[in-house]
Image (spheres, grey):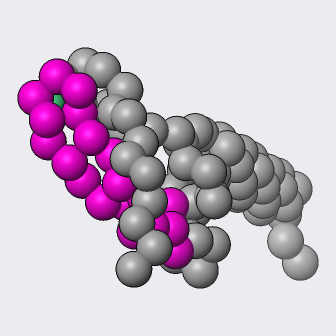
Amino acid sequence: MPTFGTVVWVAVGLLIGYVLWKSGIAVLRGLTSMPPEPPPAGELRKVNRRYRCDVCGVELKLTMAPDEDPPPPTHCLEDMTEVAPLYE
Ligand SMILES: [Zn+2]
């Protein structure tokens, strides 16, 4: 027959476990809702866009983006301008 003290400690233990579990879920929720979250690899779209930096002239090709119309990358603290895509 468990004593009253034992019951109290078990209850306290369960309560602590419950609080930890809840706060753990809250932390996970906080982490997952934190922007920017990289999308899963399966959600990346294949794109074929070229951008040129007007400042230094560097050009780069974008082959993967999280959506079909990605914002232009930044280089030399300026937005890069899109080069007309070449349909080869
Ligand atoms: Zn540049």
Q: Main secondary structure of the magenta part?
A: strand
Q: In this view, which residue lies farthest toward the left? A: 56
Magenta stretch in the rendered image: 46-65
Looking at the picture, how far across and down is residue 54, in whole percent? 23, 27
Asked if residue 84 is positioned above or below residue 66 in the image, the reply reads above
For the N terminus, the image quarter is: bottom right
Viewer-closest of 70 and 29: 70
Magenta-span inclusion, residue 1: no
Examine the structure image and report whether residue 47 is included in the region drawn in magenta: yes
Residue 50 is situated, as x and y percent measured from the top left of the image, at 35, 54
Image vertical order of residue 66 relative to residue 72, above or below? below
Task: Point out residue 13 in the picture as x, y percentages from the top left corner.
Answer: 71, 57
- The residue under the point 23% across, 33% down is 53
Report the side of 81 relative to 14 (left or right): left
**As rendered, which of 32 and 18 lies closer to the eye?**
32
Residue 57 versus residue 87: which sits nearer the camera? Answer: 87
Residue 77 lies, in percent from the top left, at 25, 19
Left or right: residue 48 compared with residue 12? left
Ligand 1 is in which quadrant of the figure? top left
